[in-house]
Image: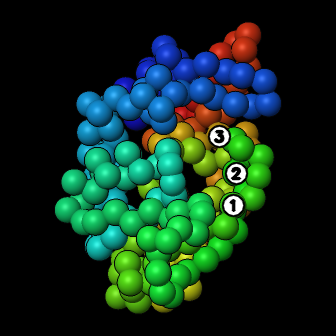
Amino acid sequence: MQLLKDRIKKDGKIRAGNVLKVDSFLNHQMDIELFGEIGKEFKKRFADCEVTKILTIEASGIGIACVAAQYFEVPVVFAKKNQTKNIAGDVYTGKVESFTHGRVYDIIVAKEFLKAEDKVLIIDDFLANGNALLGLAKLVKDAGASLVGAGIVIEKGFQEGGALVRASGVRVESLAIIESMNEDSGVVFRD
């Protein structure tokens, strides 16, 4: 998606440790017009799939998932990273390690919002090591639901996550795949 790649080159900031900061338009301050184009692109790429729910993980994926859900006309469910008093009753749980935060989270989705008859599309902002995506896929499997695929805004193609998730059988559609990046030469995208 050229519009996204251009925005990453213009406003993305590369930091040590393979960190790409896109917080001025994607995951802190959100460019809703760009999100609309991202949502349209996900709808186009998954046009061959019936989708009844979009699943994401808090927090950065929520905004993107909500805008994308408008094009699919389905609800969004997000996995919480902490148990709260608002989640009562039975839950699906899993563990995910965050590349960005360098810690392991227990993720939780109430069983009432993820059913066996659901056809789930996972939407997330980044794919690096694949842990979040595999953790979300496990929740879908635990629910007995069907996972139709995963829509990723930015994939770090130089990390193992994309290959790992695809090898597990998940269809992954990434809008921008970064082949390499460093502070001197910037971002190089995979064609």
In the rendered view of the protein, which quadrant contains the C terminus? top right
To which residue does mark 2 refer?
98
Q: Residue at x 38, y 78 (%)?
A: 113
> Is disc 2 surrounded by few (<14), some (14 to 19) or many (20+) residues within 10 Å?
some
Q: Nearer the viewer, mark 1 or mark 3?
A: 1
Residue 162 x/y as whole percent: 65, 53
Residue 33 x/y as whole percent: 26, 31
To which residue does mark 1 refer?
105
To which residue does mark 3 refer?
156
Which residue type does callout 3 highlight? Lys
Element type at mark 3: strand
Q: Residue at x 78, y 24 (%)?
A: 16
Q: CA distance from mark 1 to mark 2?
A: 7 Å
> Is disc 3 surrounded by few (<14), some (14 to 19) or many (20+) residues within 10 Å?
many
Res 109 seen here: yes
Residue 79 x/y as whole percent: 51, 65
Which badge, 1 or 3, comes first in the chain's sequence?
1
* Front residue of 49 and 90: 90
Q: Residue at x 42, y 28 (%)?
A: 29
Which residue type does callout 1 highlight? Tyr
The image's mark for residue 158 is: none
Element type at mark 2: strand
Which badge, 3 or 2, comes first in the chain's sequence?
2
In the rendered view of the protein, which quadrant contains the N terminus? top left
Which residue type does callout 2 highlight? Ser
Res 146 seen here: no
Residue 142 x/y as whole percent: 56, 85
Q: CA distance from mark 3 to mark 2?
A: 14 Å
Q: Residue at x 51, y 58 (%)?
A: 57
* Front residue of 188 and 72: 72
Element type at mark 1: strand
